Image: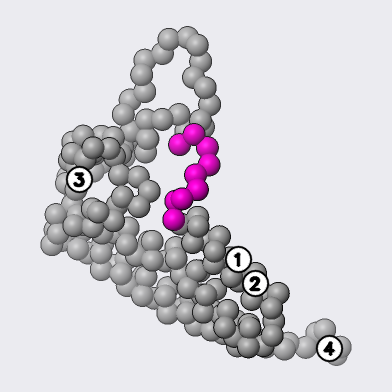
């Protein structure tokens, strides 16, 4: 059997990444179950009452044209309000519908509390990459270390919502 066919095993960085990912996945899953139970049991009040949520399922998330394309010149009725506009008007009564990270201000409602574990799980990759960077430098694997730093920077920048693309 040639050396190419032999398994070298996982590097310490790969094992650390996998360990963090596994533990975070279980924590995230547990938090999802917990926040969903809080929502279902009514321990915390939701922004949209459970018996009314199905009225909003048929609505688009936003009343905006989802493609950013120019509207045709012919006269058309204005678009129906989207889910965010409707729940804001009917329940939240904010100046503008919650977009981006605005849901953080609504964690007092059980239906928005459910976003917390989802956001946590979305950020696990950043944590995993950040954790392996010191080991990569210790092994003098500068190329991978720089790529991991770039990955962390790009993901943090994307999550920050500082850069936006398109007409939304």
Q: Which residue is mark 2?
A: 146
Q: Which residue is mark 1?
A: 150
Q: Residues within 10 Å of mark 1 (few under 14, many from 20)?
A: few
Q: Quadrant of residue 151?
A: bottom right
Q: Residue at point 38% right, 66% down?
A: 120
Q: Residues within 10 Å of mark 3 (few under 14, many from 20)?
A: some
Q: How many marks?
A: 4
Query: Compared with residue 123, is residue 96 higher up or lower down, i.e. above or below?
Result: above
Q: Which residue is mark 4?
A: 3
Of the numbered discs 4 and 3, the one sitting upstream in the chain is 4
Q: Quadrant of residue 6?
A: bottom right
Q: Which residue is mark 3?
A: 48
Q: Are marks 4 and 1 in contact (CB under 8 Å)?
A: no
Residue 148 seen from this side: yes
Q: Residues within 10 Å of mark 2 (few under 14, many from 20)?
A: some
User: Could you tell whether 19 is left or right of 36 in the image?
Assistant: right
Of the numbered discs 4 and 1, the one sitting upstream in the chain is 4
SS class of the residue under badge 1? helix
Q: CA distance from mark 4 to mark 1?
A: 32 Å
Q: CA distance from mark 2 to mark 4?
A: 28 Å
Depth order, front residue of 119/152: 152
Q: Residue at point 36% right, 70% down?
A: 29
Q: Are marks 2 and 4 in contact (CB under 8 Å)?
A: no
Residue 11 percent across, percent down from the top left = 64, 86
Residue 124 percent across, percent down from the top left = 46, 70
Q: CA distance from mark 4 to mark 3?
A: 60 Å
164 in the magenta segment? yes
Q: The N terminus lies in which quarter of the figure?
A: bottom right
- Residue range highlighted in magenta: 160-168
Q: Main secondary structure of the magenta part?
A: loop
């Amino acid at each position: 059997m040639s050396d190419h066919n032999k398994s070298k095993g996982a590097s310490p960085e790969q094992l650390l990444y996998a360990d963090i990912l596994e533990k975070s996945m279980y924590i995230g899953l547990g938090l999802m179950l917990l926040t969903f139970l809080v929502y279902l049991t009514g321990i915390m009040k939701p922004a949209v009452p459970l018996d009314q949520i199905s009225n909003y399922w048929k609505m688009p998330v936003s009343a905006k044209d989802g493609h950013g394309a120019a509207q045709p010149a012919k006269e058309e009725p204005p678009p129906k309000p989207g889910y965010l506009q409707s729940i804001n008007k009917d329940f939240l009564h904010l100046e503008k519908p919650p977009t981006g990270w605005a849901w953080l201000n609504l964690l007092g409602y059980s239906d928005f509390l459910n976003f917390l574990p989802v956001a946590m799980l979305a950020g696990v990759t950043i944590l995993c990459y950040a954790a392996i960077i010191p080991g990569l430098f210790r092994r003098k694997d500068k190329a991978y270390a720089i790529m991991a730093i770039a990955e962390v920077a790009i993901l943090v920048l994307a999550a920050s919502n500082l850069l936006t693309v398109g007409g939304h």
